[in-house]
Image (cartoon, rainbow, N blue to C red):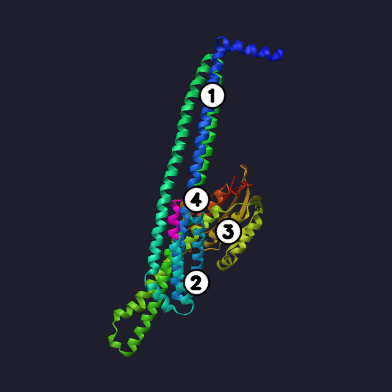
Amino acid sequence: MPATLRARFDAFRRFLNTPGFGRRVVLLLVIALALKLAVNVTAFVIIDRTAQQDALSRSFQEIRRASRSVLIGVLSAETAQRAYLLTGEAAREAEAMEGLREVDRALMVLGTAASRDADLAPLVEEVRATARDKAQELGVTLDLARSGRVTDAVRVMATGQGQALTDRLRSGVGAIDDLVGRRLAAANSASTNGLRTVGVVNGISSVLIISLAIAIFWLLRTYIADMRHKQLELDRLNAGLEDQVRDRTLALTRANEEIQRFAYIVSHDLRAPLVNVMGYTSELQSAGKALEAQLAAVEAKSPKLVQPDAVAAIREDVPEAIGFIRASTEKMDRLINAILRLSRDGRRALHPEKIDLKTLASGAAAAVHHQTDAQGAEIEIGDLPTIESDRLTVEQLLGNLVDNAVKYLDPGRPGRIRIEGAHRPDGMVEIRVTDNGRGIADRDLERIFELFRRAGKQDRPGEGLGLAFVRNGARRLGGDVEVTSVAGEGSTFSLILPRRLTVTASGEPA
């Protein structure tokens, strides 16, 4: 052993064998290091298990979505089948076939999951067999209708076999949903317990480490102890704050994704009963026409047999009720489309590029040119800067603001709309759309940005989604939208966006 190394080893041994301040400090540091290592190993193991539980949860959710997609596909195909028998439209037949194809895709996902799960396999096999029988029953009726034998197809449906298969399929999907639900609850519970355990371990370790630090600080000089204590405390608070911000940001991101997926799923689920209502409304219209024809025949032969109440019901009350139903279903369809649009826009990847806002504003003005000409209004475009952002989103936001300004111009005076913007000292860009329209009351300035909420007199078409879309899109780009207004004089909407949009590899704002 070299003399220098031997001398250092001997000095270290004498240090350990000599009681005193230095040895006590080293001993406490060694204990702290060992404790920290133990905590890190424990946290790593628990976090790894939690990650496995999260993976199981995602797998269970995929199985649940696939099983429900089977039922939704069958219901969609069944609805389209009925519509095809009623109308004979080729589009309805295509919808039925697309529903069956969706069932096949979902069954493939279930089959893959069942191949690795002995408990799930018999349930999936039962659903697959029932879906196959249901598809065969649908195919028979569609073939009959396609060949012109609609009466035979209706007779097949009247046997109730198709409804029985649908009920059996619903029961099978429910069984899969129950099994997956129990497993999902267990996985979520295990994940929650793991995270709770990590928190407890970290709490205990923090208490012990702080106790050791206090012991070390007590041995040091008062000035050094105070300084180091403050520094460590500041570092600990900063680290905790960064972790808290990161965790909360992640939680908000996940919650937003869940809301978007929920809106998308709910909107799709609402379409099935809506299609049924629309189909039955058409059926009622056809029945009303038949009754009208029969009434006309009776009036021609025996006018005295016709009751005035019956005439009013067939020729006025029933058509009016059907008209109300159709108008309501069409409005609901527009609302569903709007929800789907918001959901899709929230999931679309962003692609930053250099944008000339003046060119974009000219396009927005040209898009409403026919409306401004009809109202005798003018759109003036002032100075506008260049930014780097997602072109499609910015174009939609600016288009919505211009369209909103045109929609609510005051017919009592010539309309004037001005689009301008400038850089702000805080690194943002402000785009202002000013009009001399009706204006907005103070109590409604925040309400207009809420979903399905509108302010003032409701004499313009729309569902109350345009400004909600603008705020949602602006915030996704890292900005916001503000409004100032005087009722009866006009409004100014300020779209505030960052000069340069930064996104992650997945197309999400950084």
Q: Earlier in the sequence, mark 3 or mark 2?
A: 2
Give the spatial CA distance, label 3 vs label 1. 62 Å
Residue at mark 2? 93
Residue 40 magenta-drawn? Answer: no
Q: Could you tell me if the residues under marks 3 and 1 are in contact, i.e. CB atoms within 8 Å?
A: no
Residue at mark 3? 399
Q: Earlier in the sequence, mark 3 or mark 1?
A: 1
Residue at the image position 62 percent from the left and 43 percent from the top: 427
For this rendering, which residue is in front, 196 or 252?
Answer: 196
Look at the image and give the residue range highlighted in magenta.
Answer: 116-127
Please state which of the two labelled residues, at mark 4 or mark 1, is closer to the viewer: 4
Q: Quadrant of the C terminus?
A: top right
Can residue 463 be seen in this snapshot? no
Check the image and report above or below for 382 versus 231.
Answer: below
User: What amino acid is labelled 1 in the image?
Assistant: Ala
Q: Position of residue 496 (x, y in %)?
A: 58, 48
Q: Secondary structure at mark 2?
A: helix
Residue at mark 4? 116
Q: Position of residue 33 (x, y in %)?
A: 55, 24
Please state which of the two labelled residues, at mark 4 or mark 2, is closer to the viewer: 4
Q: Could you tell me if the residues under marks 3 and 4 are in contact, i.e. CB atoms within 8 Å?
A: no
